[in-house]
Image (cartoon, grey):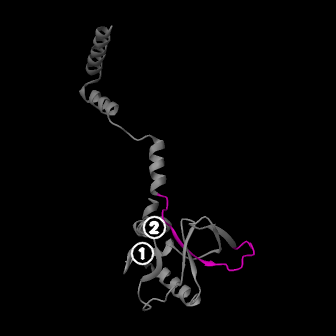
Amino acid sequence: MRKNLATVCVFALFILTVGTGCEAFKEAWEDATTYEDTPEEIAAEEEESSQKKYEVALHAIVKYPRATPNEQDIPTLDGKTIWIKKNQLFSSKNIKRVKAIPRPGNPDLYDLEIKVDRFGRLQWQLLSGNRAGEPVALIVDGVYFVSFYPEQPENDSTYWIFLRVGLDPVTARGIARNAKKNYEILNPGAFSLF
């Protein structure tokens, strides 16, 4: 039985080779033996590459929540909730690059140095001027991580801003690693339309 099946396969291969020519047979063989992604796999890869990870947002903290439409409670790392104003004060949309910097004397805590775009620099100047002495909430992917006081930049022409936030190493490095990709996703250029 196996001998007959092998003979039939060899005969079919011979007929296919003679009937279609070498080039057509070669193309058919390559199509049959090469692996191509299915449309579902291609869509999943595109979706994964277009998703934001470690997206940063700064929000004002609500001391006395009244559950108005502009207020929202969000989860914290310890399972509790904190109330914030929904309108972002600053976000990954204006952060081009991030450096995760270990704190001197405490390598378990990291601060962030962020490079902002032109609009981000102006926005930060307003934020640090208007919110001087008031803590803001650092939200990463919709979860509250820490509150900190926004500091004025050393000069008005710098695009680098230091955030004294004291994050864990994994989160700080994740923010730094994904900052450029998040910026590109949130600010699609004209070249991405074609």
Instruction: State left or right for residue 58 relative to residue 6.
Output: right
User: Within 10 Å of the Cα at label 2, are there few (<14), some (14-19), or many (20+) other Cα atoms?
Assistant: some
Q: Residues within 10 Å of mark 1 (few under 14, many from 20)?
A: many
Q: Which amino acid does label 1 sit on?
A: Tyr
The reply to whether dot 1 and dot 2 touch (C-beta < 8 Å) is yes
Residue located at (49% from left, 87% from top): 151
Residues rendered magenta in the picture: 50-70
Look at the numbered disc 1 and give the secondary structure of its residue: strand
Location of the C terminus (image quadrant): bottom left
Figure quadrant of residue 24: top left
Residue name at image x 48 percent, y 69 percent: 187
In the image, residue 57 lies in the stretch drawn in magenta: yes
Q: Residue 25 carries which label?
A: none
Q: Residue furthest front?
A: 105
Residue 41, image x, y percentages: 45, 44
Q: What secondary structure is found at the residue carrying circle 2?
A: helix
As rendered, which of 194 and 39 lies closer to the eye?
39
Q: Which amino acid does label 2 sit on?
A: Thr
The quadrant where residue 10 appears? top left
Q: How many marks?
A: 2
Mark nearer the N terminus (1 vs 2): 1
> Mark 2 sits on what residue?
171
Queried whether the magenta region covers residue 169, the answer comes back as: no
The location of residue 148, given as percent across then percent down, is: 53, 81
Residue topped by disc 1: 110
User: What x and y, as percent, mark residue 153?
Assistant: 45, 88
Viewer-nearest residue: 155 or 107: 107
